[in-house]
């Protein structure tokens, strides 16, 4: 068994969870946020049999798309008389960031 941890865009989380649940795959959702953009995202956690990993990755890929988001860079220290125009920087986010780790043991007690 593997534990799949996927960080997905908030707008893609429900459709991804629905697609997994429709195939009988259990999934737990955490509200999270990215350290770089400090925007809300969603982390999905799912215990999966090894032979279903590719199916699950396919469903995540189908439901999560890449987006452009903007961040405002921190202003530098400016001297009196200087000025700083904060141009937003475009950043590509997603589709999904996925970690797959081995599970030593899985129990439902
Ligand atoms: P954030 O940390 O808010 O990052 C959002 C996007 O900003 C990233 O998209 C990437 O394009 C860019 N980015 C992140 N850190 C950067 C940096 N130090 N310098 C320049 N650009 C940077 P994604 O790579 O698609 O990541 C989306 C979200 O997935 C991340 O949100 C974070 O919550 C999570 N994530 C990505 N890689 C991760 C990792 N190695 N470990 C844990 N979480 C990760």
Image: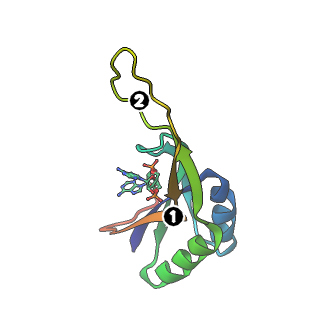
The image quadrant where one finds ligand 1 is bottom left
Q: In the rendered image, which residue does mark 1 sit on?
A: 96
Please indicate whether residue 88 sits to the left or right of residue 105 in the image.
right
Locate residue 70, reporting x and y percent: 55, 46
Residue at 29% across, 68% down = 104
**Residue 48 point in image, percent of width and height:** 47, 72
Q: In this view, does 22 lie above or below 11?
A: below
Q: Which of 108 and 63 is in front in this view?
A: 63
Q: Which residue does the image show at 44% across and 24% down from the upper left?
A: 83
> Of residues 55 and 96, which is closer to you in this image?
96
Tag 1 or tag 2, which sits nearer the N-term?
2
Q: Is residue 60 left or right of residue 99?
A: right
Q: Furthest-bottom residue in view? A: 51
Mark 1 vs ligand 1: CB under 8 Å?
Answer: yes
Q: Which residue is drawn at 50% across and 34% down?
A: 86
Residue neighbourhood size for the residue with mark 2, other residues' Cα within 10 Å, grouped as few (<14), some (14–19), many (≥20): few
Q: Where is residue 33 in the image (x, y as percent from the top left)?
A: 49, 43
Judge left or right: residue 104 versus residue 21: left
Q: In percent of the image, x 60 and y 59: which residue is there?
A: 67
Query: Can residue 30 be seen?
Result: no
Disc 2: which residue: 75
Q: Quadrant of residue 98?
A: bottom left
Q: What element carries label 1?
A: strand
Query: In the drawing, what numbered circle is on residue 11?
Result: none
Residue at far top of view: 80
């Amino acid at each position: 068994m593997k534990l799949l941890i996927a960080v997905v865009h908030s707008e893609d989380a429900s459709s991804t969870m629905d697609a997994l649940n429709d195939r009988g795959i259990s999934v737990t959702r955490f509200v999270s946020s990215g350290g770089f953009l400090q925007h809300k995202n969603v982390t999905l956690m799912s215990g999966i049999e090894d032979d279903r990993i590719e199916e699950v990755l396919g469903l995540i890929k189908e439901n999560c798309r890449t987006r452009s988001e903007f961040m405002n860079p921190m202003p530098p220290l400016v001297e009196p008389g200087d000025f700083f125009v904060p141009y937003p920087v475009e950043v590509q986010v997603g589709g999904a960031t996925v970690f797959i780790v081995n599970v030593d043991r899985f129990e439902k007690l």
